[in-house]
Image (cartoon, coloured by chain):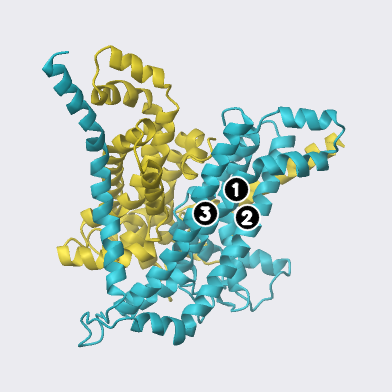
Amino acid sequence: MKRGWRALAIAVVAAVLVAALTPYLWVFLTSFKTRIDALSGTPVWLFAPTFEHYPQVFLDKGYLPLVWNSVFIAVSTTLLSLGVGTPAAYVLARHDFAGREDLFFFFLTTRMAPPISVVVPMFLLFTALGITDTPLAVILAHSTFNLSLVVWVMRGFFADIPREIDEAAMMDGNTRAGTFLRVLVPLAAPGLAATAILCFILSWNEFLYAFVLAAFESRTLTVGIPGLITPHGTLWGQVAAVAVVATLPIILFTFLVQRHLVRGLTFGAVKG
Amino acid sequence: MSARRILGGVLDRGVVPLLLTPSLVLLLLILVGPFFYMVGASFTDLSFSIPGRDGNFVGFDNYRRLVRDDPVFWSSFLLTLRFVVWAVAVEFVLGFALALLLYHHVRRRRFLLTGLLVPMMLAPVAVGLIWKLLLQGDFGMLTYYLRAVGVIDLRTALLSSPDLVLATIVAIDVWQWTPFVTLVMLAGLLSLPREPFEAAVMDGARPYQVFRDVTLPLLRPIVALVLLLRGIDAFKEFDKVFILTGGGPGSATELLSIYAYRVNFKNWDLGYGAVCAFMVYLVVLILCSVFYKAAFWGQAQRKRAGGRAA
């Protein structure tokens, strides 16, 4: 009985892994295939690789600046959200005041806000301000969800630090601000790092805000993807090359924050 | 106490609102402002494509149009509900089953969990692209194998078949998000206190009874959480479907966000588009407040149950 379950479990685990990874593997392989192999009617698993697609799309088609745009926007929104959100998380974790829970709920609704609803007025507003198609527009837009992510997740990390530590620091003559900056932030540093990486991933992966607010000069890598798909004669090797570059760094980052992922993705409600 | 100390104390207390303010200002600027702008625009005839419609006040005309004269909105609304219910239900059943299997019968889970993370962390646009490649009618890898085993016939391409396309995007969403359910449910299972299980086994409960009478009730807050989080996200679905089908063939996959996108940024009918966007917002806000209750109700419960720190 027990043995049967184990065999079943191993079979299921193997099947799940194959199902989860094969689609990605296929795109990875396609990025090294010649046009003939890529468009073959019967799937080609073994082939002589070509490395032409990467330079073609990133240099000849000018997709390299898109990588830079993605990095710049993701790093900026991460810094902005952490800088503004961490102090707020500390206050929500440590100080009681009327309406605290309502405020906390307010931060949650901002994370949940549907991009399609926010982006319409944001587009009109940013057009009036003349900042559409600049990185600033996308950085601000991405901070809508990243700021509340920081507030929610960091509040949990601060709450995990025993209050006695604050009290001891205050006894030693630290001010509240000093306690926060010199004692609590260093203690919460692992959480801070994990949150930063999550912010980076969310911004890097985001599509709709970036697509509407910066479709030309400042477009990100995700926005560049649809432009490569045409009804006739899509160059799948190049599309796959862009997809690989747009996803590989994120997969590596994910492994770094694996331990905190459940917590980050459930807004601290479930601690992994 | 010297005056300086007291003054210092007052200043120090003042730091608290100072730490909170920047985040509130930022949110007011980029979220609350646009929100009210949207509500305001929904009472106007603002359009970038029709001359003379430059934001005149029209009262509730747009809302009347939504309720009376726009069957497309409502069919899109129903389509979205079908998408959400199917996707979340399948993800939950598969994900929970996998979590239980891992919890009870697999020791070294690390490797599998790492592999499972891949689909859910990819950019949704990239997921759409991957599946578009796999499901191409003439050379798609998956199309080839599905035809080879006879699941679909030689003339069918999943993404351009009006009957199968909704099921296909549900399946792709399931591929991407089942791992999330597994991950969270497994974390939930691992966080449960041991005592109720030991007591149940001592009382001679069978495994099925333990599951029904102990595991499920204890997990209920986390189940609610997963369903709501996935429900909210699925309701907002845009990226994958935009790449995969653009809402087609016809309007077979025109989910609410895709429809709202079309009204606003293809027809440039911004006054009416604001109403559509507002409706999506409203549904999400309702789901969100339920989520909040569920999350906190869960935390209070766990505190009462004295469960191990999760």
From the viewer's side, name the closer residue of A187 and A201: A187
Q: Position of residue A173 (x, y in %)?
A: 24, 14
Verify CB contact (< 8 Å) between mark 2 and mark 1: yes
Task: Decide: few, some or many residues near mark 1? Use Cα within 10 Å; few <14, some 14-19, many ≥20.
Answer: many
Chain A in the picture: what colour?
yellow
Label 2 sits on residue: B91
State the residue position of label 1. B181
Image position of B308 with respect to A198: above or below: above
In the rendering, at what x and y percent does residue B254 appear?
49, 74
Closer to viewer: mark 1 or mark 3: 3
**Chain of residue at mark 2:** B
Q: Residue sitting at 45 percent across and 67 percent down?
A: B243
Q: Residue at x 87, y 37 (%)?
A: A1
For the question of whether residue B182 can be seen, the reply is no
Are discs 1 and 3 both within one chain? yes
User: Which label sits in the foreground, 3 or 2?
Assistant: 3
Chain the render paints cyan: B
Sequence-earlier tag: 1 or 3? 1
Q: Report the residue marked by disc 3.
A: B290
Check if mark 1's residue and mark 3's residue have beta carbons within 8 Å: no
Mark pair 1, 3: CA separation: 19 Å
Q: Chain of mark 3?
A: B
